[in-house]
Amino acid sequence: MLVLPDKMPSPYTRVAAVIGDPVSHSLSPSLHNAAFAALGLDWMYVACHVPEGQGAKAVQDMRTLGFKGLSVTMPHKAAVASAVDNLSATAAKLGVVNCVRVEDDRLIGENTDGIGLLNSIRTQMALDVEGLRVVIVGAGGAARSVALTMVENGATVGIYNRTHSSAAQVVEIVGGTSSVVQQNAIRDAELIINATPLGMAPNDPMPFDADLLRDDQSIVDLIYEPAKTTLLKEADSRGLRTLNGLGMLLHQAGEQFRLWTGQQPPIEAMAESVGLTV
């Protein structure tokens, strides 16, 4: 299934796309088409449903169709990483790609998830992570991306996951000031980031024991639908600073826009397209 923007292309229109399974729920077309319109660029962005197992083929289709940019969401991030011509240093370390750009007819895999969250925290929470004690809950691809960016920007990072071996794999990839921690480490953290899917369904349990929270902490949940997970509601009730994942989505898209076009992203216009105030 192909989801098109409300725009007719010209023969010279540059096309970018997002691939995923599922993809019909994606806000990326709204974000990117708002950016192109704000700067008057003859670009358009479409959503393409690509079934699981077809991510590498989609990269070849990108070459054939002459797409100028590709966003990659689940479950294709690892497959696309193995199908592009080169990887950025970040994408190579993580082994996953969420963005492909074209450089001299070569496809370059990038990962903008971590910097997207970092920019969201900086702008929406006015928080500098340098020197902070951070606990990331979860050990999937998002946890890897976020952990690497936090370490590279001066934070001390603990990875808590119910499966110890999965947390250890994240630490092996990220290195630096990262380490595997137990749940009790949440009590001493200044910033806690939920990178698990717990909270997407109404009856999901909390990703960790809420009694570990204390008054002066900041809580980020990478989930943005629903806008307020059980974790964020609990943190709000305790007067803590909270942030959901919509800002991360916005800012990682902004980084992709910059990589594709070479221009600074019109963040305010992009934010307005998804009902976010920045």
Image (tube, rainbow, N blue to C red):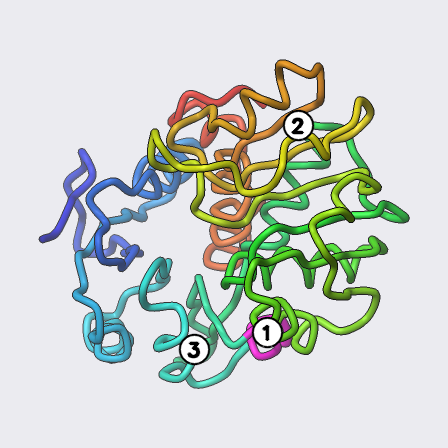
Element type at mark 2: helix
The x, y position of residue 188, in whole percent, is 84, 41
Residue projecting furthest to the right: 131
- What residue sits right under mark 3 in the picture? 81
Q: Residue at x 77, y 66 (%)?
A: 179
Picture quarter with the C terminus: top right
Which residue lies at the image location 76% right of the left edge and 73% below the top edge? 175
Query: Which region is colored magenta?
Result: 88-94
Determine whether 126 is above or below 167 in the image: above
For label 3, the crowd category at 10 Å Cα-Cα, with few meaning under 14, some 14 to 19 and many 20 or more, is many
Give the SS element for disc 1: helix
**Relative to 168, 104 lies left or right:** left
Q: Does the magenta stretch include residue 209?
A: no
Q: 97 left or right of 213?
A: left
Contact between labelled residues 2 and 1, with CB atoms less than 8 Å apart: no
Task: Of the two numbered discs 1 and 2 on the same chain, state the one appearing first in sequence.
Answer: 2
Q: In this view, does 249 lie to the left or right of 40?
A: right
Badge nearest the viewer, 3 or 1: 1
93 is within the stretch colored magenta: yes
The disc at residue 165 is: 1
| Residue under pointer 2 | 124
